């Protein structure tokens, strides 16, 4: 597009190849190894009007780009971007909601089933030849039957998970910052109250200071010895040491995790636990969904620079005008 071809878009670190290709086709693409102000020349810093990334973008980096107008974040979660600071500086921030909702919700249900029914371990039993040598895999002590589910974070993904769980015939409750209008599930005003009322807790909560280690020893204790915890939100929302202890000493029955506190590092103590089902943050990681996310990143940039309106602004920057 001729009207955007002279606009410089900075990509610090890595980015989905499809997004990078589309940026290069429509803008002037500038790569940077990391989002470090020290790596910026004065020429590059002053030229950059847009940023596309899937890495931490802090206040110092935003301040180092005097003509920055928009940060297009790859991912629905944007806790790695200082969106509040961007908003104060008049910089738009966008994310990629909706296009990954169903994929992540599907993953949450699969992870829950893996956790309670030990399906990955049963498959390993077959692949290792043990079914033929030693007989049938043991009966799983866990089941979805008779469970009640609490969802921590009733946003788009939380609601998609709830719809799927309703098909299993399970009662559903939730905790959110505030009740969600039109949602037919039981609302709890705090996380501890929710954990006390259910035996299965699914965290879809975003990261950030407000949710830091919200799932703590007290919440896990409230789930009880038959309790199951599933996290497909952010690893920072869980006190990981308390979770390891709760799994090891039987405070809860099992956990299924797709996210961790210090990714890609996963504590050896967690890996060693047989009652933990672990995935390497693959919630939205299908070819189709990641391409749709990449498209939305670039579509936000194109929309901003051609109509002065973003497609999916985050709450902290909805007031920013082009």
Image: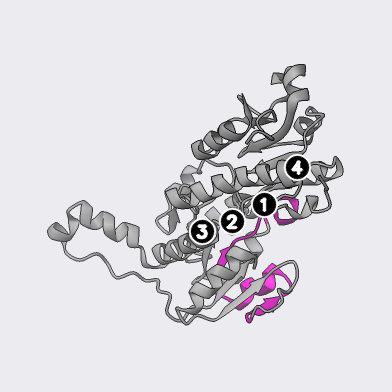
Q: Nearer the viewer, mark 1 or mark 4?
A: 4
Label 2 SS: loop
Q: Nearer the viewer, mark 3 or mark 2?
A: 3
Label 4 SS: loop
**Dot label at residue 82:** 4
Label 1 SS: loop
Q: Which of the pair 232/39 is nearer the observer?
A: 39
Magenta-tinted stretch = 184-213
Task: Determine crowd level at label 4: few under 14, some 14-19, many 20+ residues with C-alpha closer than 10 A.
Answer: some
User: Dot 2 corresponds to which residue?
Assistant: 233
Question: Which quadrant of the rendered structure holds the N terminus?
Answer: top right
With respect to residue 125, does 190 lie above or below?
below
Q: Are marks 2 and 1 in contact (CB under 8 Å)?
A: yes
Q: CA distance from mark 1 to mark 3?
A: 16 Å
**Given the current orientation, which residue lies at the most extreme front position?**
2
Q: Residue at x 33, y 62 (%)?
A: 119
Q: Which of the pair 154/300 is nearer the observer?
A: 300
Left or right, 68 with respect to 104, comes to right
């Amino acid at each position: 597009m001729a009207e955007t071809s002279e606009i410089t878009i900075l990509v610090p670190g890595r980015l989905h190849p499809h997004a990078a290709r589309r940026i290069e086709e429509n803008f002037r693409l500038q790569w940077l190894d990391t989002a470090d102000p020290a790596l910026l020349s004065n020429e590059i810093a002053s030229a950059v009007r847009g940023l596309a990334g899937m890495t931490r973008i802090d206040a110092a980096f935003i301040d180092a780009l005097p003509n920055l107008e928009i940060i297009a974040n790859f991912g629905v979660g944007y806790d790695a971007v200082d969106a509040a600071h961007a908003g104060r500086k008049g910089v738009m921030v966008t994310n990629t909601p909706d296009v990954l909702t169903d994929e992540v919700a599907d993953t949450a249900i699969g992870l829950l089933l893996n956790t309670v029914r030990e399906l990955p371990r049963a498959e390993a039993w077959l692949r290792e030849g043990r079914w033929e040598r030693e007989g049938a895999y043991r009966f799983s002590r866990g089941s979805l039957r008779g469970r009640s589910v609490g969802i921590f974070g009733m946003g788009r993904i939380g609601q998609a998970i709830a719809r799927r769980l309703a098909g299993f015939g399970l009662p559903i409750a939730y905790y959110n910052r505030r009740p969600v209008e039109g949602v037919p599930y039981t609302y709890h005003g705090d996380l501890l109250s929710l954990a006390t009322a259910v035996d299965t807790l699914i965290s879809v909560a975003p990261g950030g200071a407000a949710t830091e280690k919200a799932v703590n020893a007290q919440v896990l204790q409230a789930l009880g010895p038959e309790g199951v915890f599933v996290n497909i939100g952010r690893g920072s929302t869980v006190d990981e040491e308390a979770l390891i202890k709760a799994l090891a000493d039987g405070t809860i029955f099992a956990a299924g995790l797709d996210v961790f506190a210090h990714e890609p590092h996963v504590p050896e103590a967690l890996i060693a636990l047989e009652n933990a089902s672990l995935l390497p943050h693959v919630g939205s990681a299908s070819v189709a969904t990641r391409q749709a996310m990449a498209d939305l990143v670039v579509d936000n940039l194109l929309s901003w620079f051609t109509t002065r309106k973003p497609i999916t602004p985050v709450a902290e920057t909805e007031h920013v005008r082009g």
